[in-house]
Amino acid sequence: MRLKRAVVLLMLLSLLPFIPGGSLNLYSGSEYVVIEDFNKTGDVFFKEWRNMESEKKPWEEYYILSENGKKFLRASTERNPALSIQIGKVMNNKWNIFSYPVITWEWRVHKLPANGNESRSSRRDSAAGIYVLFQRKKIPLVGWRHQPMNWIKYVWSSTLPVGTVIPRKKVQSGVILYDARYIVVASGGKDLGKWMSFKRDVISDYKKHFGKTPSANPVMVAILTDSDKTGSPAVADYANIAAQKN
């Protein structure tokens, strides 16, 4: 399932010139770029965010809610713990990471996948995860399966301590198809049910874990709450994803 998702994700990224990206609110002279504030209807949201598994809209797992005037995305696998649907939003160079290197977001986790452990393929479930994806370069005359990608995934882990970094890599025909780092930024059940704010310098994380500065802007931001490995429901809320200056 995870390899299939990675392949589907790469296929979608290979079609970037033909996919209209969702609009970002870039205010002239401001300190931030709004990547997603979830202040929209479900139909509009899923025109901008794509189901990475298929063309089917992921209503089974993701839906927009409002609480005390705050809109957010609810991700829940309670009705079907076998779900593992990743959704992504194409950036189309609308996030200039060199001017706005810091990503910020809010999470509220309600249920952790029991015994989830991102370092074990048999238990690689996360209550909440946000990806930032980079295409290292475009190889001409080569199909999407061989386009090299790097990505960082920030996760709320059920069991691994904050600061844990898990590398993942796939090599095919001598080419690194993807090289990824899972970075644990929250862990365990201490703060369940609370809105928590996070901030990460993506360029700094990229340089630390890939050894150099990214060569281009992120091509996509993605979200995943999953429980298919553990079979234990996961529920999390996402709000106010933005990029800002240092």
Image (spheres, grey):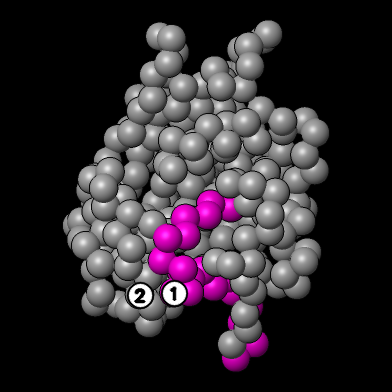
The residue that label 1 is drawn on is 78
Label total for image? 2
Q: What residue do we see at 62% from left, 31% from top?
A: 11
Q: Decide whether residue 181 is among the magenta residues.
A: no
Left or right of 126 on screen, residue 103: right
Q: Position of residue 28 (x, y in %)?
A: 76, 53
For residue 237, say whether it is visible: no
Q: What residue do we see at 70% from left, 49% from top?
A: 55
Q: Nearer the viewer, residue 6 or 70?
A: 6
For residue 211, what is the image quadrant?
top left
The residue segment tinted magenta is 68-87
Left or right of 175 on screen, residue 33: right
Q: Position of residue 204 (x, y in %)?
A: 39, 39
* Up-down relation of residue 181 to residue 44 (above or below): above
The residue that label 2 is drawn on is 111
Q: Decide whether residue 70 is among the magenta residues.
A: yes
Left or right of 129 on screen, residue 146: right
**Kind of residue at disc 2:** Lys
